[in-house]
Image: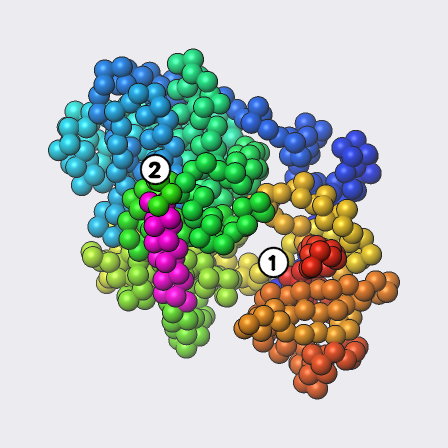
Amino acid sequence: MEKWFVTRKGAPFQEIAEKFQIHPVLARLIRNRDVIGDENIELYLHGTIADLHDGMLMKDMDKAVDILLEKIREDKKIRIIGDYDIDGINATYILQEGLRMLGGDVDTDIPDRMKDGYGLNKNLIDRAFDDEIDTIITCDNGIAAKDEIAYGKRLGMTIIVTDHHEVPYEEMDEEKHYILPPADAVIDPKQENCEYPFKGLCGAAVAYKLVETLFQVTGRDVDDVDYLMENVAIATVGDVMDLVEENRIFVKQGLEMLKRTQNLGLKALIECTGVDAARLSAYHIGFVIGPCLNASGRLDTAKRALELLGAKTKKEADVLAGDLKALNDNRKDMTAIAVEEAIQMIEESSLQNDKVLVVYLPECHESLAGIVAGRVRERFYKPIFILTKAEEGVKGSGRSIESYHMYEELNKCKDLLTRFGGHKLAAGVSLEEENVDIFRKVLNENATLTEDDLIAKVSIDMQMPLGYVSEKLVDELELLEPFGKGNTKPVFVEKEIEILKGEKLGKNQNVLKLRVQDAQGTTMDAVYFGNIPLFEEYLEEKYDKLAVRQMLMGRRTGMKLAFTYYPTINEYMGRKNVQIVIQNYQ
């Protein structure tokens, strides 16, 4: 069940269209994304590297720069400790490249997801101490590692934290008291009193800001590190950050650089996954390239992905890219099995009545819990935790819906957890096995979700007859890219669209191609990549089986539906035709 609603936000669309030389439809879409005022519209449409903020505005940036320049001068051993996901891997690579170019004696370490768990821990610090490391820099982690950093300080190490996660807090007298780790410098735009204007950066972007600032302060040419922006773009999309303001610039610029990347590893990965480099988009990072980088940290070691980024020969890059693709293919198969098992468990038990789903799959590989949770959430539109058996106790990942703040809800039952962290829409937890049922019970007792909260919302930009769809409009819509979280692909709707005929295409019959006509008489091709059996079932209920069969045989049966859609251009044998891609129907 879905609830459709059309966003209606007012603005002088015609005036904006004329001022910025864009289609009035684009003016409306930009307003729907809450981009208001000439300056912000200009930045949204034409923002460049020159519009990025000064890294020195970040709290403790000056401290971190002074410390690192001194350590480089004194030839002290510096170790970068990242995280095992796409953001942590790219952040590690960015710091490693930047510090090496400045002459730093630098190496890296990334925790093993299964043995070490997330973020900085005692093992990593002991390892650094044994290797006579003088200074540790964390990236994409560290903000919550108060005890571990205190331990490292007792051993006499200098520690710099670069992170982008929420600062942990304790509630006392209904006030939040934030707890910063006792590091020598803490760079995290989310900490209190940080004057950096944009709080939504990923860990790799924070790492990039540090490298950029080091180059500025030492009088080096900042253009020399511009190429690292492609790593920021990969991390920003892969870590599902909002594609607004600075993130939008990073991803836009980074994608252009990626299309002609000189990084042998990334080039090999783009080739081996079959992505057309010239048409590379945020979609390919999110769903093709990114998952391969993430698969190393899930099923093997994230150090393999870091090796790929640093590959020195084409042969090495090709081998590593092939390995990562194979790991990801394996991950897909394992994920499909776990998703099926979770859905079955929910549908065949009392779990289906819960507002917050807690599913314990002991056999599921713990690294897949987050992906499985995301898929199952799509199916039931409820907050969900997928828990798996770990070396010690139970570990899991949660994925939420818009009306449920996962991190705050976990804070309410933190006594049941041995460890937890995250933000509004995603979280990670560790707990004892005997607490699994109590955890489920407490989360549901605390949940204030209403029936309305648990209905998926389809936000539509505007109603638009098919006659508006033109090659010019489709070309102009590219100005709004990159699309992703925080800057979603536009959604148009039209009612009373008649299906004239249809056919199933593809080796697995998994694409539905329709010829459709709107009330004004405009006919056009439409394609649907969703769940075709479910779509057919819907049509059979609304009309009948015979009508559906006839429609698929190319006959007109008078079936009419409302569709949400996005316009695209289909190129075939040198010919271009506009078409619509159907997203939802009712």
Tell me if residue 553 comes above or below residue 387 in the rendering: below
Q: Coloured how?
A: rainbow
- Range covered by the magenta-colored residues: 316-336
Coordinates of residue 466 in the picture (x, y in percent): 79, 58
Numbered mark located on residue 312 in the image:
2
Query: Which residue shows up at 41% across the image and 57% down it?
Result: 371
Distance of label 1 from label 2 (alpha carbons)? 48 Å
- In-front residue for pair 410/77: 77
Tell me if residue 368 comes above or below residue 167 in the rendering: below
Query: Which residue shows up at 49% across the image and 23% down it?
Result: 223
Q: Nearer the viewer, mark 1 or mark 2?
A: 2
- Crowding at dot 1, Cα within 10 Å, few <14 / some 14-19 / many 20+, comes out as some
| Residue furthest top as drawn | 219
Query: Which residue shows up at 58% across the image and 25% down it?
Result: 51
**Residue 509 picture quarter:** bottom right
Residue type beneath disc 1: Lys
Residue under pointer 1: 457
**The magenta stretch spans residue 295:** no
- In-front residue for pair 554/484: 554
Query: Which residue shows up at 21% across the image and 50% down it?
Result: 115
| Residue furthest right as drawn | 520
Of the 4 image quadrants, the one containing the N terminus is: bottom right
User: Which numbered disc, 1 or 2, marks the residue that appears first in the sequence?
Assistant: 2
